[in-house]
Image (tube, rainbow, N blue to C red):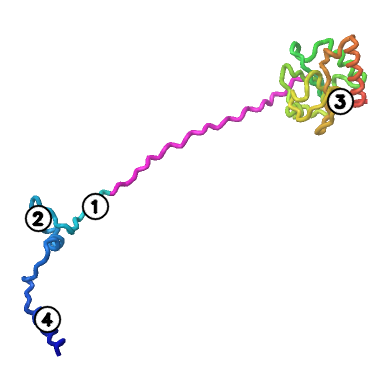
């Protein structure tokens, strides 16, 4: 019974209250009417009042594209396709490479010596092609493309000078990639009457016999 009486008392009290008698705290009123009330000069909001912060402007990051670096491509070197000047008709695909800076091909005396050696092997100038390395640098790729030598005689020109991928001693026949090579001293060293020259000529003759006879 007492609990019922208390409930009734509370109900009557609430009904007798007027909305005009309700007092709200200042910070609540300020928060409710923030957008309609004008704050007097010098107004300081009470502690606990939340100020509505203005949104910061959105900053859009700008990116300036950087120019791509210019890469210069190395131009390939032009391939020299100029054919070698040759002495002879190359009928038997025998290439003779010499190094004679003072002559177009071979000095007259050395040419006579070479002709005698060829004749002893039953060959002549129509069977060979003489190329002077001093007037046009000889490379194995280019000379093979032009003359297709089955035999290549190097007089005073070492194998690596013409970019041969192999090396071998003088007076030693060397077969390689469908061509037989022979390297000897220059014709000027072979063409003489000294004992040294005679010894060199003998070595050359032994090699030529094994290659052509």
Disc 3 on helix, strand or loop? loop
> Where 65 falls versus 47 (above or below)?
above
Q: From what the image shows, is residue 186 above or below residue 141?
A: above
Give the mark, 2 or 1, whose residue is nearer the N terminus.
2
For the residues bearing labels 2 and 4, Cβ distance under 8 angstroms: no
Spatial CA distance of label 2 from label 1 is 21 Å
Dot 1: what SS?
loop
Left/right placement of residue 1 relative to residue 188 reads left
Q: According to the image, label 2 marks what residue?
A: 38
Which quadrant does the C terminus fall into? top right
Where residue 88 appears, as percent x and y from the top left, is 81, 20
Q: Residue at x 8, y 72 (%)?
A: 19
Q: How many marks?
A: 4
Above/below status of 22 relative to 87: below
Place of residue 13 in the rendered image (x, y in percent of width and height, measured from the top left): 8, 79
What residue span does the magenta drawing correspond to? Answer: 58-86
Q: Residue at x 86, y 16 (%)?
A: 114
For the residues marked 3 and 4, what is the alpha-carbon distance in whole angstroms? 131 Å
Measured as percent of width and height from the top left, residue 106 is found at 80, 14
What element does badge 4 sit on?
A: helix
Vertical order, 102 against 92 (above or below): above
In the rendered image, which residue does mark 3 sit on?
172
Kindly indicate the quadrant of the structure image that contains residue 11: bottom left
Specify whether residue 74 is painted magenta: yes
Marks 3 and 4 close (CB-CB < 8 Å): no
Check disc 4 and report the residue beneath it.
10
The 10 Å Cα crowd at callout 2, few under 14, some 14 to 19, many 20 or more, is: few
Tag of residue 55:
1
**Mark whose residue sits in front, 2 or 3:** 2
Label 1, residues with CA under 10 Å away: few <14, some 14-19, many ≥20: few
Q: Does residue 18 show up?
A: yes
Q: Locate residue 119: give its quadrant.
A: top right
């Amino acid at each position: 019974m007492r609990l019922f009486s208390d409930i009734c008392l509370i109900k009557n009290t609430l009904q007798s209250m007027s909305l005009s008698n309700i007092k709200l705290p200042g910070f609540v009123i300020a928060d409710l009417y923030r957008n309609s009330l004008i704050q007097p000069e010098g107004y300081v909001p009470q502690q606990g009042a939340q100020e509505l912060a203005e949104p910061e402007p959105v900053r859009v990051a700008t990116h300036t594209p950087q120019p791509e670096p210019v890469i210069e491509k190395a131009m390939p070197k032009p391939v020299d396709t100029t054919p070698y000047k040759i002495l002879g008709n190359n009928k038997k695909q025998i290439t003779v490479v010499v190094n004679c800076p003072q002559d177009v091909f071979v000095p007259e005396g050395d040419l006579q010596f070479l002709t005698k050696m060829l004749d002893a092997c039953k060959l002549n100038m129509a069977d060979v092609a003489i190329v002077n390395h001093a007037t046009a640098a000889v490379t194995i790729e280019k000379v093979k493309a032009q003359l297709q030598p089955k035999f290549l005689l190097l007089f005073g020109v070492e194998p690596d000078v013409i970019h041969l991928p192999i090396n071998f001693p003088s007076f030693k026949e060397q077969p390689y990639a469908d061509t037989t090579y022979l390297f000897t001293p220059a014709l000027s060293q072979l063409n003489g009457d000294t004992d040294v020259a005679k010894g060199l000529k003998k070595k050359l003759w032994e090699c030529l016999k094994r290659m052509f006879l």
